[in-house]
Amino acid sequence: MPLVVRPSKIHSVGVFTTTAVRKGTRLVEYDGPRITPEEADRLYDEAPRTYLYGLEDGKTVIDGEGIAAYFNHSCDPNCEIDEVKGRAWIFALREIAAGEELLWDYNLYDDDDPAPCHCGSPKCRGTMYSREWMAKLRRKARQKKAKKQAGRNSARKSRRISK
Ligand SMILES: C[S@@+](CC[C@H](N)C(=O)[O-])C[C@H]1O[C@@H](n2cnc3c(N)ncnc32)[C@H](O)[C@@H]1O
Ligand SMILES: [Zn+2]
């Protein structure tokens, strides 16, 4: 597949196709050493950019190597990543014209560091985290706030009782 790594408006460098791509084409394997989520956390905790992909088993993370690792994220992607028998492949989601940047939706999860998105799409959700993960983070923040408020209320109550 004629793919090239070139500077991208979205972030640093990205992957572009030099020829038109048919919808459904299997473009490239997202390959690299298999590590555990714990190893990934330990190795890349402070890294400003990572090349990781978590397999559906929840126990395996691919530490991406090669061209597949350079695909940038978009909230309105033209590619998707899918698992076939434990291997991750990038597929074209639609017909793609020659010269387009190839992008998939990272749908990040399992972290709460900021991950602002610069994909520039009108559908941009402002973050590379998935909608589901963002909802979970908001739920957690609401619960934390409610717990804090409940603590304050009970402290006030006990001050009243001790008078
Ligand atoms: C797998 S790398 C992609 C290749 C990367 N552009 C490079 O030059 O090495 C993933 C990193 O690229 C950046 N990135 C990719 N898509 C992005 C986007 N839509 N908005 C902001 N940063 C993005 C983030 O720093 C992310 O951690
Ligand atoms: Zn976006």
Image (spheres, helix red, strand yellow):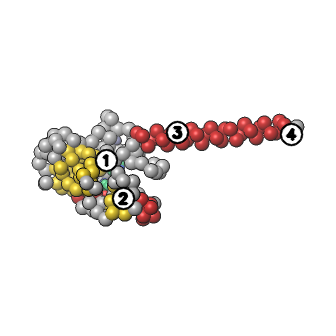
Q: Residue at coordinates 28% horizontally, 56% vertically from top-left?
A: 86
How far across and how far down the image is residue 158, in percent?
Answer: 80, 39
**Would you say the residues marked 4 and 2 are in contact, meaning their CB atoms lie under 8 Å apart?**
no
The residue to which callout 3 is attached is: 139
How far across and how far down the image is residue 134, in percent?
Answer: 45, 41
How far across and how far down the image is residue 142, in percent?
Answer: 56, 38
Instruction: Give left or right: position of 47 versus 120.
Output: right
The residue to which callout 2 is attached is: 60
Quarter holding the C terminus?
A: top right
Which three-letter amino acid code belongs to the residue tagged 4? Ser
Foreground tag (4 vs 2) = 2
Label 1 residue near ligand 1, CB within 8 Å = yes
**Would you say the residues marked 3 and 1 are in contact, meaning their CB atoms lie under 8 Å apart?**
no
Foreground tag (3 vs 2) = 2
- Is tag 1's residue or tag 4's residue first in the polypeptide sequence? 1
Q: Secondary structure at mark 3?
A: helix
- Is tag 4's residue or tag 3's residue first in the polypeptide sequence? 3
How far across and how far down the image is residue 84, in percent?
Answer: 24, 52
Q: Residues within 10 Å of mark 4 (few under 14, many from 20)?
A: few
Which quarter of the rendered image does ligand 2 occupy? top left
Q: Secondary structure at mark 4?
A: loop
- Is tag 3's residue or tag 1's residue first in the polypeptide sequence? 1
- Is tag 3's residue or tag 2's residue first in the polypeptide sequence? 2
* Mark 4 → mark 2, Cα distance in angstroms: 55 Å
Residue 101 shows in this picture = no
The residue to which callout 4 is attached is: 162
The residue to which callout 1 is attached is: 73
Quarter holding the N terminus?
A: bottom left
* Mark 1 → mark 4, Cα distance in angstroms: 57 Å
